[in-house]
Amino acid sequence: MFYKQIFSLFFFLLNFCYSSLKEPEKQILNDHAKKFGTVLVQAKDGRIKPMNTLALELLRKIYKKNSLLNLDANNWLISFYQNPNFWLRYPFLKINKKGGKELFNKLKVNNFGYTSLMNFYKFNSKLKKFELIFEKDFQSAFSKNPFERNSYEKELINLIEKINIFYKILKGDYIKIFPHSKLEKKNFTWKSWIKKKNILYNKYISSLFFSKKKNKWEKSNKILDDIIGFQQKKGILPSDKRIKLELIYNKLNINCFLMVGYSFLGIIILFFAFLKNFSYKKINFFFKKNLFRLINLFFIYHTLGLILRWYISFHAPWSNEYESLIFISWCILFSGILISKNRNLIIPGLSCLVASIILYIAYINLINPEITNLVPVLKSYWLVIHVTIITSSYGFLCVSSLIGLLVIIIFIINKFLLKKNIKLIISDLTIINELSMIIGLFLLTIGTFLGAIWANESWGSYWNWDPKETWALISILIYVLILHMRLIPFFKGKYIFNIFSFLSIISIIITYFGVNYYFAGLHSYAKGENLNFFFTERCYKLLIIIIIIIIIIYIIYKKNKKKRKENLL
């Protein structure tokens, strides 16, 4: 049954990712929509970005996808303002199953998990006005501590946030496209195209009806040209090159492509690697060489994606949770390629598979993927130095844990196959595991030390016993202990080392995810909230699986030890 779940997941990923790449059957305003996407808009944090980026962000937040009803994000946003009554009634607000049946029944959720905004309200005949169905429940949920809320209350708060986004779109709060006339006030908020009885907005909406009816878009295009010209005269804007690259970055959807590509490439590589090591068949050298070339091509594409995001955002692309996940997946693949040195197929295959899982977590809209400006504390050259070294260490330590798990699996397989060359494979993998752990520990220690210097510059103290700092220190001590376990007679042996190297990743998971989502501290500026439920629900299952694996390994290890002693006697 487990393999069916894996295949269904991959088919889901393919449909989910490539559905947005297909050409829609009928675009409402194809060329005009592209021009609309190039109009610049000011975000809440002051960042100037194309309308296309804003449209994608809003659609992802509400609908959880990049397109809707054969409309791309640009067409959808135009349609939203052109015919808001339709979108008030159309079911495209995504409801999470975690909310429970009560929420689904009250909101009249369809079979695809969507409902309309109108279903959130009921008409009060006495007061002669519409009232929010969940107003009392929402007030109760909002008054509670986030850790005290149940799944229903968490989902209810998420839905209310979506409704707020809906109304802000209607009010034009997101469409701030008119720079202030006084150029000396560089940080002055741009004006919305709806507020203060803006005549241009009404002209544009009325022109859309005329253009659509006559199929002549000169009038609508002229209004957009006027807006763009006004922005260029009055505003302090990013360069045209930067804006064009951001539009290309949005269109490429790099991380989605890599997520699917890494997963299939990892499965293919692992299949042939196991075929080579556990059978008498040999892999063609030309085929093996091409697999490594394909990995390197994917890695280069991943690198270009990070560079492109860096150029667009004006800062290193690991300043928040989404960006750091993308960078960690890059580090894992880099570690796998570096350690394997184009000899061992297993390690790059594992690296590809885990990189795809991390990109999957980043891509499925659990974390906000939008590009934002840096918070003041991160506006330092230390962001590139400290965060790069620390995050790189996670890549090597993750590869170490994967190799440990692989050795455990090989050890179980050896129980049934009893092949002579398996011991050599285990020895080679253990050496690589130890090398990866040493590199990871070195980077983690240096990164923590440099972080203390940055902390002194930012907060006036080298060490504050912040949760992140404390768990980084705990992780260092754990890996130091594992690397020196060989000096303790009871903990000698390759199998014990690999078991502990596999389990040690828990400390990194707590340092990276646990601290960010369950503890408040000085490093909370990069935290998110959406992953809270994701890891709470899965941590227990993961721990149970780990305990079962450890028990199985221990029993097999003890039996083999007894047999060896009997044979010696």
Image: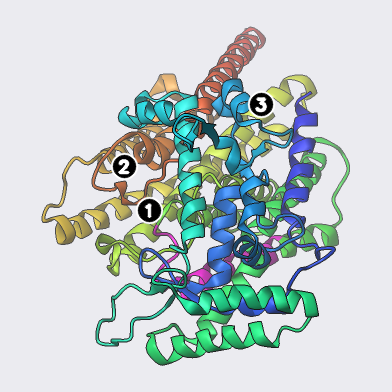
Q: Position of residue 234 (x, y in %)?
A: 38, 88
Q: CB under 8 Å between callouts 3 and 1?
A: no
Query: In the displayed structure, would residue 84 be above or below residue 431?
Result: below
Q: Quadrant of the N terminus?
A: top right
- Helix, strand or loop at mark 3: helix
At x 75% / y 74%, what residue is drawn?
212
- What's the amino acid at mark 1? Ile
Residue under pointer 3: 411
Q: CB under 8 Å between callouts 2 and 1?
A: yes
- What's the amino acid at mark 2? Ala
In the drawing, what numbered circle is on residue 472?
Answer: 2
Q: Position of residue 78 (x, y in %)?
A: 63, 67
Name the chief secondary structure element in magenta: helix
Mark 3 to mark 1: distance in Å? 32 Å
Neighbor class of circle 3 (other Cα within 10 Å; few <14, some 14-19, many 20+) is: many
How many marks overall? 3
Tell me if I can see residue 333 in this picture: no
Task: Write down the quadrant of residue 253 in the picture.
Answer: bottom right
464 relative position to 201: left or right: left
Q: Position of residue 317 (x, y in %)?
A: 45, 64
Query: In the displayed structure, would residue 11 be above or below residue 535?
Result: below
Q: Quadrant of the C terminus?
A: top right
Look at the image and give the residue range highlighted in magenta. Answer: 295-319
Residue under pointer 1: 390
In the picture as drawn, the residue positioned furthest to the left comes out as: 460
Please check the rendered image and state whether residue 297 is part of the magenta-colored stretch, yes or no: yes
